[in-house]
Image: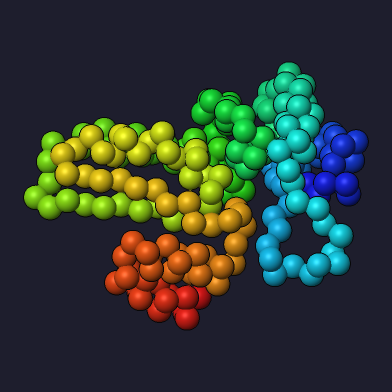
Amino acid sequence: MVCPGLNDGLALERTLLDLAGFATGEWPAVLSAAVVPVGLTRYRPAEDGLQPVDPACARRVIAQVEPLQQRFSTELGSRFAWLSDEWYLMAGLPMPPRASYEDLPQEGNGVGSIRAFLEAMDAATAQLPQALERPRRLSWVVGKLVAEALQPFLPHLSKADKIFAAGEAVMPRLNLNGESAAESFVSVCSTVAPAAARASETLGRTV
């Protein structure tokens, strides 16, 4: 986890090179690594000294790690260290192609998860019906950054007659606890679907 001003820059490079040193031999101790940004919520102590990642920082980290990936690919036969999707979203840069994530060893840490999701959605919606008996309204509850990445896919869902696909960007950040997610969802649903809001309030009490 990269914390700006604490373990980025040379410290990040040293960390990745050290980890790569454990990825060789007959019994490698480290198979892959994920580079993720620190996630800060409004519940953290104000005096913790942590700084949020901004677009400039995201671009610096990408520019630093991508050359290392090429080096690892040559030396280890794998990119070994992957940048999580947030870096590209925050930097405003396109994410790498799906093939660059190899077999998605760090998908659980948000590395290539958007590419994998869109790939799965393409397969699942390859043969949509031409029409439905009743209109369907679909909502995705995602962070604002992720919503921007998913927007291009929405017209694909709207191909069928009477299907309306809407993505709501309701979460202010990528890392949230259950209470924040429930609060955000209630806020949006109170505007567009009161019945759904009541259901989400019940969910919020059980999170």
**Residue shown at 88%/46% (left/top)?**
5
Q: Quadrant location of residue 102? A: top right
Who's the residue at 32% across and 70% down the image? 194
Residue 196 can be seen, yes or no: yes
| 72 on left or right of 172 | right
In the rendered view, tell whether residue 198 sits above or below residue 147: below
- Which quadrant of the figure has residue 75? top right
Residue lying furthest front: 191
Residue 91 sits above or below residue 201 on the image? above
Task: Please say whether residue 1 is visible from this viewpoint.
Answer: no
Q: Residue at x 85, y 42 (%)?
A: 8
Task: Judge by depth and name the residue closer to the eye, 164 or 112.
Answer: 164
Q: Nearer the viewer, residue 67 or 170?
A: 170
Tell which of 37 and 53 is nearer to you: 53
Q: Position of residue 200 (x, y in %)?
A: 40, 72
Residue 33 appears at what percent x and percent y?
A: 71, 41
Asked whether, in this view, residue 92 is left or right of residue 121, the answer is right
Residue occupying the far top of the picture = 74
Residue 204 percent coordinates (x, y): 47, 75
Q: Residue at x 30, y 52 (%)?
A: 138
Image mark count: 0
Q: Residue furthest left?
A: 133
